[in-house]
Image (cartoon, helix red, strand yellow):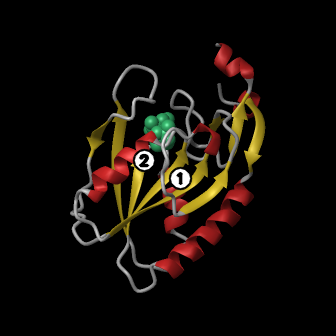
Amino acid sequence: RSDVSADLADILLTEQQLGERLDQMAAEIDADYRDQDLLLVGVLKGAVMVMADLARRLHHTVEMDWMAVSSYGSGTKSSGVVRILKDLDTDLTGRNVLIVEDIIDSGLTLSWLVSNLRSRGPRSVEIATMLRKPAAAKVEVDVRYVGFDIPSEFVVGYGLDYAEKYRNLPFVGTLAPHVYGG
Ligand code: PRP
Ligand code: MN
Ligand code: MG
């Protein structure tokens, strides 16, 4: 299928809305980390878009590194037990770490990740996420920067996938029912 618009039901957040919010988040981050070291840690694969768009808005010398994680168990990712598929290349000792995510759903991935990274001796660990689903939270995660709180609908685009597709959409939207129906 090449015409992606046929697969979409609604657009939840436009490219312009995402961009305007990213401008604000970047300004906050610049102010909060003024004259301080900053290491951005993107969580593959969903965070690729927000990492690229947030990082290029910062007037700040940052480093960027990546982790890939996967939940144990079949199908559902609600176990909260996470395994590292690709670890950081960077030693976190004494570093200010800002984890960059596309979305917090149950919060289980980030909850695990924050304690994992905290155990490595960083100076600080904070989170920036483009999207958050407050109603879906299974654990409390202390998030410093949130783009948008959204309803607990399945959304795709701007890094978020359905069966690995739709990550490349420049906006966030919901899928038409026929896409799930097969
Ligand atoms: C998605 C999303 C977050 C995580 C949020 O990643 O990108 O990383 O799930 O879910 P949670 O709050 O319930 O833990 P996914 O595991 O689908 O991998 P992906 O980024 O490669 O799509
Ligand atoms: Mn992810
Ligand atoms: Mg995914």
Residue 67 pos. (x, y %): 33, 49
Q: Is mark 2 within 8 Å of ligand 1?
A: yes
Q: Is the N terminus in the top left, top right, bottom left or bottom right quadrant?
A: top right
Residue 179 location, quadrant: top right
Residue at the image position 76 percent from the left and 42 percent from the top: 11
Residue at the image position 38 percent from the left and 81 percent from the top: 36
Contact? badges 2 and 1 (CB < 8 Å): no
28 versus 169 height, above or below: below
Q: Is residue 117 visible?
A: yes
Q: Which residue is mark 1?
A: 49
Residue 97 pos. (x, y %): 36, 65
User: Which residue occupies the foreground of this view, 4 or 153?
Assistant: 153
Residue at the image position 53 percent from the left and 45 percent from the top: 104
- For mark 2, give the secondary structure: helix
Q: Earlier in the sequence, mark 2 or mark 1?
A: 1
User: Of discs 2 and 1, which sits in the foreground?
Assistant: 2
Q: Type of residue at label 1?
A: Met
Residue 121 location, quadrant: bottom left
User: Which residue occupies the foreground of this view, 34 or 48?
Assistant: 34
Q: Is residue 133 visible?
A: no
Residue 38 pos. (x, y %): 37, 73
Q: Residue furthest top?
A: 182
28 versus 111 height, above or below: below
141 versus 181 height, above or below: below
Q: Would residue 7 be found to the left or right of residue 54 on screen?
A: right
Q: Would residue 129 be found to the left or right of residue 110 on screen?
A: right
Residue 122 pos. (x, y %): 27, 66
Q: Residues within 10 Å of mark 1 (few under 14, many from 20)?
A: many
Q: Is the C terminus in the top left, top right, bottom left or bottom right quadrant?
A: top right
123 versus 145 height, above or below: below
- For mark 1, give the secondary structure: helix
Q: Which residue is mark 2?
A: 110
